[in-house]
Every structure is written in C-alpha cells, then in structure tokens.
Image: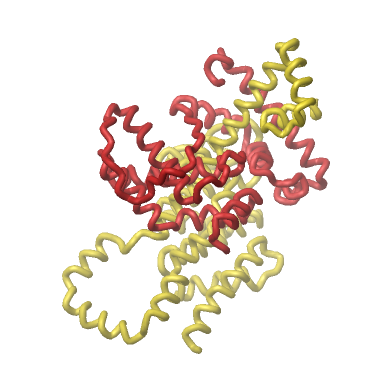
Chain colours: A yellow, B red
Amino acid sequence: MEDLYDTIEQYVLGKMPEGEKAEFEARMNADPALQDEVAAFRVAREILETGIADSLRADFAGWQSAKAGPKPARRAFLRVHSRVWAVAASLLLLLGIFGYWRVSQYSGDTLAANFYDSSELTTVRSAPAGQGELDAGLSALRAGNFEAAATAFQAFEPSNPYYIDAQYLLANTWYQSGKLNDAETILQQLQTNSDPEISEKADWLLLLAYLKDGRKGNPETIQLLDKISADPGHSFYPKAAELKRELGRFWSGWSR
Amino acid sequence: METTDQALIEGILKGGAARQQAIKVIYHLENLRDKVVWYVQQNNGNRDDGLDMFHEGIIVLDRNIREQKFRGDSSLSLYLYAICRFLWMNQLRKNQKVELKEDHSGMDEPNEETPEIALISEERQHLFRKLLGTLGEKCRKVLEMWQLSYSMEEIAEKMGLSSEKMARKSKYRCMQSLIEMVKQQPDWREQLI
C-alpha cells in the first residue's frame, strides 16, 4: 500500500513517465477501487492545502499587525500636539535618515514578528485523536479567527489533562490578536510549570510579547532574554542568541 | 535574501524557512500591494477587500509555484497581480457586481500569463478544516511538510522521529487516516471531488 501511495502521488503530480502513466490509467479503468484511491488522494491533498493556506493567513495577520501604525489613542495625541511635534520633527531630522532606518529595522514590533513562527505552533504535547476542541481552536487560530480560537481554548477546564496546552494556545491567540496583557498573564503562570517544554515555550512567547508591546529596552525584557540566552539547554537558546545578536547590532550601530 | 523572481521561486520550491522568507518578501512588495488595493477600490471594494485579495493572491501564487503551474512567461509581480484581479472578479461575480472599471495601473500587459486558479467553496473549506482537526496536529504537521516537499530526513528531524524510515512510516499512516476520513464522508465522490 505504501508503494501504491507513492505511485498515486507520481500520477497525481504529473511526474509519472508516459509509458507508466498509460499502464496506470489502464489499471485504473479496470479497477474502481483504485479509481477511488486516486480520487480520495486528490481530495486529501486539497485538504492539506487548506491547512497550508490557513497557516499563511495567520502569518499575514502577524506581519500586518507588525506593520500597523501607531495606536488610535497615540494618533490623537500626535494630532493635539502637532506644533510641538513639528519642532521635534525638525530636531529629529538632525539624527538623519540612517538613524530612522535603524530604529524601524530593529523596532520591537518588527523583531517580534520576525522571531514569531506560527508554522511551529502546535499543541505542547501531542494530543490524541479526539481532542477535537484543541485542534478546532488551532485551526481557527491558523485561519486568523481569533474569537473562535479563544472560545475553543477557554472551554478547557483546569481538570482537563490538556488544560495547559489550551492555555498556551490561548496565550498565542491573545498574542496574535494584540491582547498582550492577557497573553502575559497566562504566560507568567505557564513559566512556573514543572514541564520544561511548557515553561520554555512560555518564556519565549512572553519575551516576544514584551517586544511586540514596545518594551524592548525594559528590565523585564532584558532579564528574560539574558535568562534564555545564558542557558544552552533551553529549547529557545539558539533563537535567543540570534535575537541578542540582532539587538547588539542595533546598539553597536548607535555607538559607532 | 535575494529578491529576484528566480530567487523567490527557488525559495518557495525549497520549502521550510526559505519558503517562509520568500513569501515574506513578496508580502512586503508594497507597490504591488497598493496596486491591488487600488484596483479593488476602483471596482466596488474597499481597502480591506484589496488587502484580502492580495493575501489570497499570495496563497495561490505559492501553490502554483510549488505545483509548477507558473511557467515564467511573465514576471512574478504581473502574475500575482493577474491572480488578485481574477480573484476579485470572481468575488464580484459571486456578489453580482460585474461592471469592472478599466485598469490604469500599467500592469495589464498583453504578455501576462493567465493564472490557473482552483477555487474551493466556503462550505468545502469548512469541511476540510474539520477533517484536519480530526486528523490531529502531529499528522497534520507531517503531511503538510510532505506536501511542502520537505525531505523525509527533514520531517524526521522536525518531528523528533528517530529516522527517515520512521518519517516515511508516519507519513504513510497519516495519509492513510486522512484518505479513510475522506472516504467516510457521505457522498464524498459527489461532494468533495
């Protein structure tokens, strides 16, 4: 059967040599069960493409929120103080385009978006089939349907063995939808979990939440980044080291 | 990353982080995005509709490149723009607002490659998502990586499986489950094909 799927795959993807293709089609014409296998295989590929498209939609939502301008309240503040800001803007010009470029390139938002990888978003521990709510929530999250995702994850009671997984995914939902305070509350609790896989994932997402919230230089951010990047056993050690290098490039750029 | 069409196509075909990076570069082609938004706004849509079409266009572009449906007869930008226009026209037809305004974007060129686009209804997508949910996260991940042309070695590494052989076995079992799920759907031949 394993070989049959490989053969069907070659046929469906048009990678089968002409001679073999004719032979396979003749076999198919004579065998309705094989016809069904091929048809179901095509549908299965369509189903997988739906998942791939949903993952991309989630990425777009993340990239878009990273690119979004200042918050409305801040825009109002800028309007009221436009004269003051006009003077400030002329002073800022002295800093030059180079400085502006470096700030935007290394803004916390951009860094968080670059380091957040929704394609790696999965249940913390592999849930058996039947954990429909968890998977349904994850599908909704991938599709950018934050409300449905949050509802699904919030439905888990603390007594449920997958409560912690649901909490982690709920934190991701809040993170992606910009409800960073809610994400932080959950992640700070998960940081103390005895399972290192959970606590380390919580460490990393909390760090990204701080960055996304514009707290790049704050003590809590630096402390957490130092903690992860000082522990080679931490599962996010390589990413933290890379993030530290990025931030280092930013600061060294200013001191040059 | 290099931003030539060739480099972007190679990135998408390579899969993994290279694909992600290539898509990110395409996503940030602001001129192109603005043209798509402008076209949609000129044709009964708003900015959000335009952004949606740009996003959906990238999804189609990614798949067409992976499935070798993009022949390279036009530039990647022109091709993506053509996809987005097609998707919006299709949306308008669905909403029965078919009177389209002329395109002055300068991107409606005669040598533009006509994109091949497979459209899936909302109902079917909903059912597909439900089936993916039932399949389970691990299987979903293995099969998606396989669909994105990851090697069995890479799948084993990413999924923490002991060998390439185990990855192959896992892919086979997951595919078998998914195909069985498809066949268990009532009237699946009529409804899903």
| Closest to the observer, A207 or B105 | B105
Direction from residue B191 to residue A15 in the image, left or right: right
Q: Can you say whether B186 is above or below A103 in the image?
A: above
| Residue B72 horizontal/vertical position (percent) | 56, 46
Q: Is residue A212 depicted above or below A254 in this figure? A: above
Q: Residue lying farthest front?
A: B110
Q: Is residue B118 visible?
A: yes
The answer to which of A175 and B45 lies nearer the viewer is B45
* Residue B23: image location, x then y, percent: 53, 52
Q: Image point 63% across, 26% down: which residue? A: A42
Name the residue: 47% across, 72% down.
Answer: A106
Location of residue A236 by image quarter: bottom right
The residue depicted at 38 percent of the width and 40 percent of the height is B85
Q: Residue at x 62, y 71 (%)?
A: A241
- In the rendered view, tell whether residue A79 sits above or below residue B33: below
Relative to residue B182, is residue B166 drawn left or right? right
